Image (tube, rainbow, N blue to C red):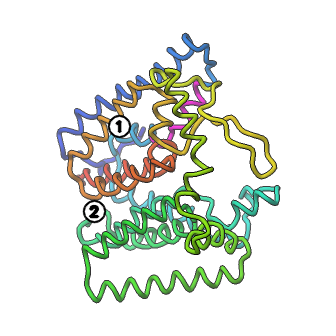
Amino acid sequence: MFIKSENRAIVNPVRIKRIRRIVYIYLISILITEFLLKQVIFNQSFFDSVKCIRYGLPLFTGLILFAQGLRVSVDLLWRTFLFAVVTSVVLSFINLLYPLPFSITPNDEKVKAVFTGRIGNLNFSFGLIGLYLLFQKRNEPTLYSGLAMRTSIASVVALIISFNRTYLAILLLEFGYFLLKRFSLKNVLKVTIATSIVVAVLFFFYENNERLQNQLDKRIFLILDGEVSLVESTIENNRDYIFEGVYERISEGYWVLGLPYSIPIFIRQARYDKDEMYMSKTDTSLANHLLRHGIFPFLLLSYIFFVLLKFKIHIFNFIFTLYLLASLNIDALYSHNSVFFVLFVFMISTHSRK
């Protein structure tokens, strides 16, 4: 943001300059809402305002970078970004087998049973972009490189090992789309070999890693065996109380300016021998943004994404649609790195080299 280079990127479309003004208005409206209106109307403290801003940092960071423009070499920036993603993913792989000194390990045995055996890295959501690059490398010369392919493969594997049912369903949908679109015997053979390798690796770790076995049994096999339906696993008894809490807060009128930080969106039920928790955000991006910052910033953000979609950049439109679907059940477009990823890919795709 604060550096320049003789090899800095140049934005091609003139329309980006116009949308940048809307981005600045959006960011200013967030600051006014959190640091002025809520402090006056709800007596919200300065530190609570900072906490509210913190939730949306991936979104706000991506938009600030977009508004400022890329001022360095696009190639260098893209390689650095890919290196950061693949490094974090590899460290997560290592941590699954050999806990690293800086990793956070839960102490409670019941919490361990639920969360260990999964990759603890939100960068796994890059796997949706990674799968796109693996299938569309000929159509994305700006984004294609050997490092991009290695990062893509690692991130797809990481997404699978995350055992996040929402992302797994969307990854399967994306995979089916590309398989049908590029159907050929050669591609079928490649997919068969790749799938066989992934299944073989998972089977090996399933037989030799109790934590991974727990995750596959709980999140995959129970659904495949019919003991638990996909709806019951992801919605019923798991999301119902979230939807009820969101509905109540909207009915109370908090959609106008958003909630003060001291009022929770919903109360999470007690589980794993832990008390109930007052939650200030949900697993749905739309609800989070609306109830954290109010209707005006929400409408501005919707308009920003609408204009970006009108640029008809295929990778952005395609991946944004996938993340939008995911955001109905996971916070993909507000507090997770995925929203930064898709904005970053848009910037890389719309910049040329000097």
Q: Residue at x 61, y 83 (%)?
A: 203
Residue drawn at (28%, 53%) of the image:
317
Q: Amino acid at mark 2?
A: Thr
Numbered mark located on residue 142 in the image: 2
Residue in the foreground of this view, choosing between 117 and 273: 273
Q: 70 left or right of 97?
A: left
Q: Residues within 10 Å of mark 2 (few under 14, many from 20)?
A: some
For image coordinates 43% across by 48% down, the residue present is 340
Q: Where residue 345 sits in the image (x, y, percent)?
A: 35, 54
Residue furthest to the front: 227
Question: Which secondary structure, mark 1?
Answer: helix
231 vs 80, nearest the viewer = 231
Range drawn in magenta: 49-59
Q: Nearer the viewer, residue 317 or 8?
A: 317
Residue 304 percent across, percent down from the top left? 30, 37
Tell me which amino acid carries mark 1.
Answer: Gln
Compared to residue 108, the image places residue 301 above or below, namely above
Left or right? Give the position of 276 relative to 235.
right
What's the residue at 56%, 30% (across, down)?
Answer: 52
Q: Quadrant of residue 268?
A: top right
Sequence order check, earlier mark of 1 and 2: 1
* Residue 159, horizontal then vertical, whole percent: 51, 65
Which mark identifies residue 46? none
Quadrant where the N terminus is found in the figure: top left
Residue 161 picture quarter: bottom right
Q: Is residue 105 found inside the magenta-colored segment of the image? A: no
Tell me: residue 167, above or below residue 62. Answer: below
**Marks 1 and 2, how far apart in space?**
21 Å
Q: Which mark is residue 68?
A: 1
Q: How many marks?
A: 2
Q: Where does residue 232 sit, x and y in percent of width and height?
A: 57, 57
